[in-house]
Amino acid sequence: MGELRPLGQDLTKESRALAEVLRELFEGLEVSVRRYAARRRRDPGTFSRYLNGTRLPPWPVIMDMLTDLAEHRGTTVTPETIEFVRELYGSAFDANSSPKHAVQIIEQQLADADHVSRRSSVRGDVLGDALLDRKHRIADLEVRLNHMEATLTSERERAGQLAAAHPDVSELLGERDVLRQEVRRLGNELQEAQERRADAEARCDLLERQLEALERPVPLPQPQPMPKILVVDDQPDNLLAITAVLGTLDQELVTVSSGQEALKALLHHDNFAVIIMDVQMPGMDGYETAAHIKRRPHNRDVPIIFLTAMGIDPEHTARGYAAGAVDYISKPFDPWALRAKVAVFTAIHLERRLGHPAG
């Protein structure tokens, strides 16, 4: 059985305390890091960093360890044990969270969105040039064909002698048809590139407002009722953590544990400023739930923040944006970043309700 890596350097006392307990739990499993990671289908390098304190694990990872240890010993996990570890986890989480860290997270998201915008802009320029070239070539072909047609003096000649009088006419007509098909294709691709750029620019605007929210409180139009927040996650511990983080915002939280319950909540409640939704849920996952929400006229404008433990990569974000999400945040989530995102979406909701520009 391989040895655990040494505890990381410069750990906070809270991170060190949690890591020491996690190492003690793991050693009780009597299995190697690589084998346990394979059993739980996790990356062994990442799991090793959880155990040396250099990376804070998602809470479900810790619950898996507690459950697996109890099963290995033929016992059950006591509420006292869970509460003890949860307190250590919360202290480590708070100690490693700060406005500075949240700024780093959102600045990286801003850089990613700006990159998409610039890349889409360049692609749009290339497609626009290609589209203009095809249109010019079609116009040239039209002139040549019209000149050929003008040499014929009767309908009969036009119908029956055009191809015979000019053997290359059919070739020009075929070339024109091909160019017209390319114009349609390039036009569609150009529109897609322009839409991607517009979406990325909108995300940049949102993220810049979120950075401002971390620097100073978001001014909210007053007085009026505060909108609700819908939180969707199949893990009760995640719901509790989000509730604790957002409890300071003075807004009603509606928490549900599935996509189906989220759709019902949107039918029975209104005035939501934002939906925070886990991506990985059994049955109807976050992508499918978001697609259902966006098909409903009454709910389609409610912004969705996807909460994911899979990491924020181009594949997942592209799928999420296609489903209707407007923002992402990774687990374990940074409370400062989450509060800033929710505060901005709440301000936008109130601005729109009063008919003010959301910007």
Image (cartoon, rainbow, N blue to C red):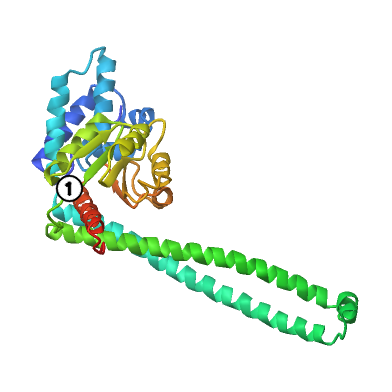
Q: Is residue 128 left or right of residue 287?
A: right
Q: Nearer the viewer, residue 349 or 165?
A: 349
The answer to whether residue 68 is above or below residue 74 is below
Quarter occupied by the C terminus: bottom left
Name the image quarter holding residue 87: top left
Q: Secondary structure at mark 1?
A: loop
Q: Residue at x 17, y 58 (%)?
A: 213
Say whether residue 13 is left or right of residue 61: left
x and y percentages locating residue 147 in the rendered image: 78, 86
The residue depicted at 69 percent of the width and 82 percent of the height is 140
Q: Position of residue 51 (x, y in %)?
A: 23, 35
The residue that mark 1 highlights is 226
Residue 164 seen from this side = yes
Image coordinates of residue 107 in percent, x first then y, are: 25, 59
Can residue 242 be seen here? The reply is: no
- Residue 218 x/y as whole percent: 15, 57
Please tell me which residue lies in front, 131 or 80.
131
Q: Is residue 212 above or below residue 11?
A: below
